[in-house]
Amino acid sequence: MTTPNIKMVRIDERLIHGQGQLWIKNLGVNLVICANDQVSTDEFQQTLMKTVIPEDVGVRFWTIEKTAEVIHKAAPHQTIFVIVASVADAKKLCELGFPMTELNIGNIHHAENKQKISQFIYLSTNEKMDLQELQQKYHIKFNTKTSPVSNDGVQDIDNLLKAIQ
């Protein structure tokens, strides 16, 4: 079994949107996988998301389970950008054997009982615990770069995760 050429795994509640074009171009990928159980069966949402993906880039809308199941079948020439909607989805990918080493936490919206981590990231207690598990059990590294062209840097969330213990 070969290791697939995954350029980035990103959490963004919006999934594929205009900003995604910047990531696709910057990463130089030729395949985008939107790993989301709801969107995998929603043709309307898929059609909207396809409008922002260049024609020469393939796109798949798969469930979390199918993504983890078939990722190892990727051809060597495929360069892949995987996007999920939540920390829970990223964690489930890892639990199912998806080969993740780094996770970009890009956009998690504000909601009740969530703590502001950055301008675009709000985390619940459960999300913090899931990130801690991803870090400790699966040795995932995190970054919070909002876009490939931003100068906002990468925020260190290690101290946040240590505070949970």
Image: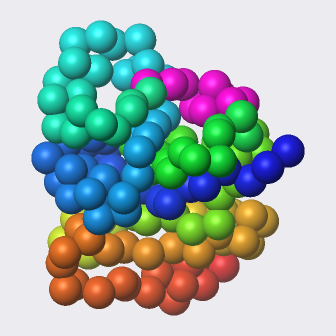
Give how far across and how far down residue 118 sits, in percent: 26, 75
Residue 140 in the figure: left or right of residue 54: right
| Residue sitting at x 43%, y 65% | 104
In magenta, the rendered stretch is 61-70
1 in relation to 156, above or below: above
Give how far across and how far down residue 19 sits, in percent: 17, 54
Q: Nearer the viewer, residue 137 or 165?
A: 137
Q: Nearer the viewer, residue 14 or 129?
A: 14
Rendering quarter of residue 131:
bottom right
Number of numbered callouts drawn:
0
| Residue sitting at x 14%, y 47% | 18
Give how far across and how far down residue 164 sits, in percent: 58, 76
| Residue sitting at x 50%, y 60% | 7
Rendering quarter of residue 32:
top left
Residue 118 in the figure: left or right of residue 99: left
Give how far across and how far down residue 85 sits, in percent: 39, 42
Asked if the stretch drawn in magenta spans residue 134, the answer is no
Q: Examine the rendering and report whether any part of residue 107 can be seen.
A: no
Rendering quarter of residue 74:
top right
Residue 24 in the figure: left or right of residue 86: left
Image quadrant occupied by the C terminus: bottom right
46 in relation to 20, above or below: above
